[in-house]
Image (tube, rainbow, N blue to C red):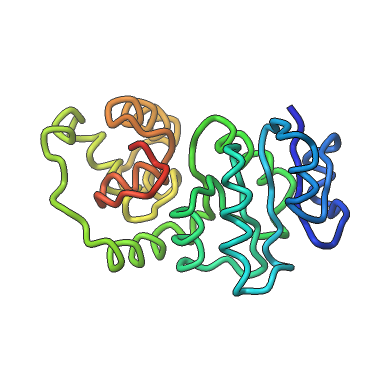
Amino acid sequence: MERIFISAIGYMRERWHQAFPDASCVSTIAELDAQDKAVFASLWMDISVIEQESRLKSIASACARGQPVVAMAGVPEETEAFRALNIGVQGYCHVGAASQQLLDIALVVENGGLWMPPPLIQRFLAVSTRVVPPAALDRPLLNTLTSRELMVAEQVAQGSNNREIAQTLEITERTVKAHLTSIFEKLEVRDRVQLALKMHNVTISGNSN
């Protein structure tokens, strides 16, 4: 299925085209509505060219189509990320993200996961727990994890990447990935963002976990 970029500039930026040579660009969501509710693999909304007061409304309109939406900001920040995810976007990134990163994001969101820049995850969690106070952790669910898996999950909740986790726990990155695969299955989450949210007991609208 086709990927569509929505941007008032009306054309594909170079990195977008490098990542998705077959993608198309429209200037407004209304142009999509004229295509008789066609189904796309994902919608990528350039919110960097939308006035601040209109961004959330535009994001909501895109999410209403029921397809994965990635919001691309000029200056990604945690409060906007929280609001965008709460509306229903599955991805939030920099409008100038590298082509390889765009491919990584597409893989995650088009398979039902959530994606946001790793540096924002910890700050996002700090904001989300202030806005939605976390409840007690689901201990019976966490008890399904081995002691080492729990250590890995706690490191993810602190915003650590795989390399940092490997160094902290003195294991290989390959072992970290193996633990994460098992953790995702046991806790019924799709990716490390959902895992971090689960560990903080934060619920996001549209997140079934």
In the rendered image, residue 124, in percent from the top left (x then y), is placed at 41, 62
Q: Quadrant of the C terminus?
A: top left
Q: Nearer the viewer, residue 14 or 50?
A: 50
Please give the name of the residue rendered at 77% of the width and 55% of the height, measured from the top-left corner.
28
88 on left or right of 188: right
Please give the name of the residue rendered at 63% of the width and 59% of the height, measured from the top-left corner.
58
In the rendered image, residue 130, in percent from the top left (x then y), is placed at 28, 68
Q: Nearer the viewer, residue 146 or 198?
A: 198
Q: Quadrant of the N terminus?
A: top right
82 on left or right of 46: left
In the rendered image, residue 151, in percent from the top left (x then y), is placed at 24, 42
Residue 125, picture quadrant: bottom left
Residue 208, picture quadrant: top left
Question: Relative to 157, is 73 above or below?
Answer: below
Please give the name of the residue rendered at 35% of the width and 31% of the height, measured from the top-left corner.
184
In the rendered image, residue 174, in percent from the top left (x then y), is placed at 44, 30
35 on left or right of 145: right
Q: Nearer the viewer, residue 86 or 150?
A: 86
Query: What is the count of numbered marks?
Result: 0
Please give the name of the residue rendered at 49% of the width and 37% of the height, measured from the top-left corner.
113
